[in-house]
Amino acid sequence: MKKESKEYSIAHHGLTDAEKAKADAELRTLRLNSLKNINENQKVYADLISLKYSMLDYLEIGIFSKNYLFSEFLKKYVSVTNTTRRKLAENLSIHETKFSKIINNKENPGLGFLYRIEEHSNGLFPASLLWQLVAKKMLIEIDTNTVEKKKQSKVVKNKLKLITA
């Protein structure tokens, strides 16, 4: 029994249901066997690529989520690279306390830190991509931090007197 493909760009396989089930089982077996044969470096690389694409998808959607803060990315990066926070801080030549503040979302990273992640990841995570995560959080903070806005407003002198229509 032939089925019409709903995808116009993909030709229908032309298999019967039984043939398709058998082909799917063979493919699944081959895939599982190939996964058993990957080494640790390949696994880390695959997980880093997955992390990068989930980050790109998040940025493309354009909706803010606390699950995609830079600090969350950094926690996943530490986990995927099979290192400790202390060791990564050392590798990035950053004080452990400063690293702790960044990874616990108490402080935003500077450009230098992002350049170091770019270098550590061998260019897999460009500083410009990482900056987009930081900037997204900062935009939300700017829009929602009414306490700081009021505080800063009080110290401004000679405000412009503009007439609006």
Image (cartoon, rainbow, N blue to C red):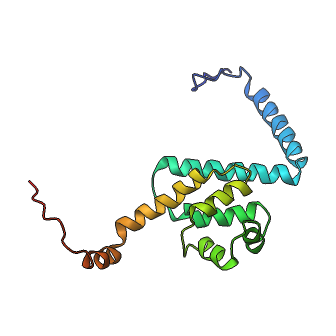
Rendering coords of residue 144 (x, y %): 36, 69
Q: Nearer the viewer, residue 73 or 161?
A: 161
Q: Quadrant of the N terminus?
A: top right
Query: Quick check: 65 above or below 86?
Result: above
Name the residue located 82 percent from the left edge and 32 percent from the top edge: 22
Horizontal side, residue 88 vs residue 156: left or right:
right
Rendering coords of residue 53 (x, y %): 63, 47
Name the residue located 63 percent from the left edge and 63 percent from the top edge: 113
Q: Quadrant of residue 63?
A: bottom left
Rendering coords of residue 69 (x, y %): 55, 63
Name the residue located 57 percent from the left edge and 66 percent from the top edge: 109
Horizontal side, residue 86 vs residue 137: left or right:
right
Name the residue located 74 percent from the left edge and 22 percent from the top edge: 15
Horizontal side, residue 44 vs residue 2: left or right:
right
Q: Quadrant of residue 111?
A: bottom right
Q: Quadrant of residue 98?
A: bottom right
Horizontal side, residue 15 vs residue 143: left or right:
right
Query: Quick check: 44 above or below 16?
Result: below
